Image: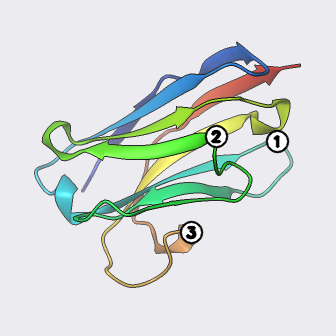
């Protein structure tokens, strides 16, 4: 079983930046694809960004492309989400998750095995 702990959320004005971190337990971090998702009040969970396990290919939702960047440090068992030019509509609880299967889309939350507890990001207008 993998446990993840997110950190870095908070309150930031529009146009500001935050870096989210997600530290995973275990020695098999490199065997997982990793993803960031978010859920705003009253809305469904949505994919934000994903990064593959070995090569580190990245994918970002259109809504955050050019503003957010996912990265990973396999030596530290940590995945990051750099968020720039934040907008009020980015306000949500952000979750990181692991995907052990080698098939399936990174953007499909149903493909993920373990989830963190979430960290709140609030962007004021």
State the residue at coordinates (48%, 30%).
Answer: 20
In the image, taking residue 96 as reference, residue 62 lies left or right, namely right
In the drawing, what numbered circle is on residue 67?
Answer: 2
Helix, strand or loop at mark 2: loop
- In the picture of the structure, the residue carrying the numbered disc 1 is 41
Q: If you read the primary sequence from the N terminus, does the residue marked by circle 1 or circle 2 appear first?
A: 1
Question: Which label lies toward us, 1 or 3?
Answer: 3
State the residue at coordinates (69%, 15%).
Answer: 11
Q: Residues within 10 Å of mark 1 (few under 14, many from 20)?
A: few
State the residue at coordinates (47%, 74%).
Answer: 111
Q: Residues within 10 Å of mark 3 (few under 14, many from 20)?
A: some
Q: If you read the primary sequence from the N terminus, does the residue marked by circle 1 or circle 3 appear first?
A: 1
Helix, strand or loop at mark 1: loop
Helix, strand or loop at mark 3: loop
Q: If you read the primary sequence from the N terminus, does the residue marked by circle 3 or circle 2 appear first?
A: 2
Q: Residue 35: x and y, percent? A: 46, 56
Residue 107: name its quadrant.
bottom right
Q: Residue 17: x and y, percent? A: 61, 22
Residue 72: name its quadrant.
top left
- In the picture of the structure, the residue carrying the numbered disc 3 is 107
């Amino acid at each position: 079983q993998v446990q993840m702990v997110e950190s870095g959320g908070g309150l930031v004005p529009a146009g500001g930046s935050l870096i989210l971190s997600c530290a995973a337990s275990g020695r098999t971090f490199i065997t997982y694809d990793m993803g960031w998702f978010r859920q705003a009040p009253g809305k469904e969970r949505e994919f934000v960004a994903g990064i593959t396990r070995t090569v580190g290919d990245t994918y970002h939702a259109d809504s955050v492309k050019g503003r957010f960047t996912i990265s990973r440090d396999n030596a530290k068992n940590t995945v990051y989400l750099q968020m720039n030019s934040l907008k009020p509509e980015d306000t949500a609880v952000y979750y990181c998750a692991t995907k052990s299967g080698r098939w399936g889309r990174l953007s499909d939350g149903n493909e993920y095995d373990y989830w963190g507890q979430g960290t709140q990001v609030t962007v004021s207008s």
